[in-house]
Image: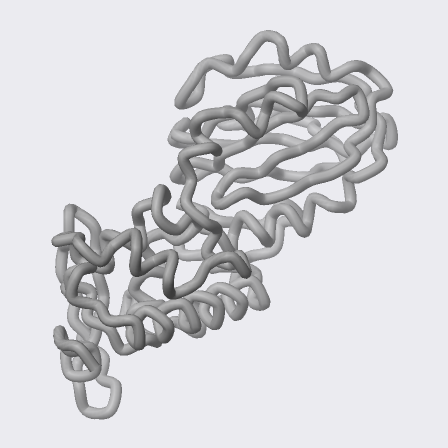
């Protein structure tokens, strides 16, 4: 699933579309995770894209007609920018054609992504946005906020990082990398983390996510940026997908937590307060 760095990279590559006029909108597959609203045809011809932003793992595209689209890429989705669409791929579900011949295509083989549409003034009230925790890269994210959220929690910190209601934008890959960088065991319960560790955790969040964005995200299976470039942060992983390799003589292990793969180095990430 594209996580914060991949979505941020996608948004940056889409900025080339700002100012372009819409020619037409086409729905080829109506049902993804949810049915694409028929009202999406209200994106009027000649309306312009005026802004594109990221909220957590969501992409918001705002038009001059005061309507906005929300895109979630799900497990395998991507937004493609093309100069022409000679032959539609069977996984191309939604297309916006622009007057300068640019084309924006939502491609999603597994159909776990979705598209929503509404008046711009209403879009921020959507429940899937209002329930989100503070963005992992937000300056508002601080030790006090996280401590209040998790200081009574019996849940392991790895799972807490995946909870979008607490901190939004982090997925499975970056959770393992962040915990390794902060030298915190993925099994440490929220209630057992002290403020010193939480401060270190936030610092590692920013360090890892900013570095991942710098390298265009991570391409492991499906992810490709809108301009066709692959991410390269996978070349800089410390523990993810590195089971059995050693760091300072300690081997990296892979375990399942809540049905998800966790990579960590037990010798360097000890389950204790330090």
Q: In this image, 32 relative to 180: left or right?
A: right
Rendered view: 237 above or below 88 = below
Q: In this image, 21 relative to 59: left or right?
A: right
Q: In this image, 80 relative to 20: left or right?
A: left
Question: Which residue is drawn at the image coordinates 70% and 24% (left, top)?
Answer: 96
List x then y, in percent, for residue 127. 44, 26
State the scheme by which the image is colored.
one colour
Whether residue 3 is visible, yes or no, is yes
Question: Which residue is drawn at the image coordinates 64% and 14% (left, top)?
Answer: 40
Residue pushed farthest top?
38
Rendered view: 239 above or below 166 = below
**Total labels drawn:** 0
List x then y, in percent, for residue 274. 21, 82
List x then y, in percent, for residue 185. 19, 70
* Quarter of the figure with residue 101: top right
Question: Which residue is drawn at the image coordinates 73% and 31% (left, top)?
Answer: 103
Whether residue 239 is visible, yes or no, is no
Rendered view: 127 above or below 57 = above
Q: In this image, 147 relative to 78: left or right?
A: left
List x then y, in percent, for residue 260. 21, 50
């Amino acid at each position: 699933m594209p996580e914060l760095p991949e979505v941020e990279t996608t948004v940056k590559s889409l900025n080339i579309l700002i100012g372009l006029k819409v020619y037409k909108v086409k729905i080829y597959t109506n049902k993804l995770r949810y049915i694409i609203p028929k009202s999406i045809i209200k994106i009027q011809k000649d309306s312009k894209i005026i802004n594109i932003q990221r909220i957590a793992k969501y992409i918001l595209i705002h038009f001059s007609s005061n309507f906005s689209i929300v895109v979630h890429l799900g497990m395998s989705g991507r937004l493609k920018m093309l100069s022409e669409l000679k032959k539609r791929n069977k996984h191309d579900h939604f297309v916006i054609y622009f007057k300068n011949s640019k084309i924006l295509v939502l491609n999603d083989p597994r159909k776990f992504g979705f598209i929503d549409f509404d008046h711009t003034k209403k879009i921020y009230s959507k429940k899937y946005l209002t329930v989100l925790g503070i963005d992992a890269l937000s300056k508002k994210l601080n030790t006090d906020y996280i401590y209040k959220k998790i200081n009574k929690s019996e849940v392991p910190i790895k799972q807490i990082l995946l909870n979008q209601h607490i901190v939004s934008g982090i997925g499975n890959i970056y959770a393992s990398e962040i915990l390794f960088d902060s030298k915190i065991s993925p099994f440490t319960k929220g209630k057992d983390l002290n403020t010193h560790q939480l401060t270190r955790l936030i610092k590692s969040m920013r360090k890892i996510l900013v570095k991942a964005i710098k390298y265009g995200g991570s391409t492991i299976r499906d992810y490709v940026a809108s301009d066709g470039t692959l991410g390269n942060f996978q070349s800089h992983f410390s523990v993810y997908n590195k089971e059995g390799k050693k760091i300072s003589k300690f081997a990296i292990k892979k375990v399942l937590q809540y049905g998800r793969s966790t990579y960590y180095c037990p010798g360097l990430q000890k389950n204790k307060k330090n």
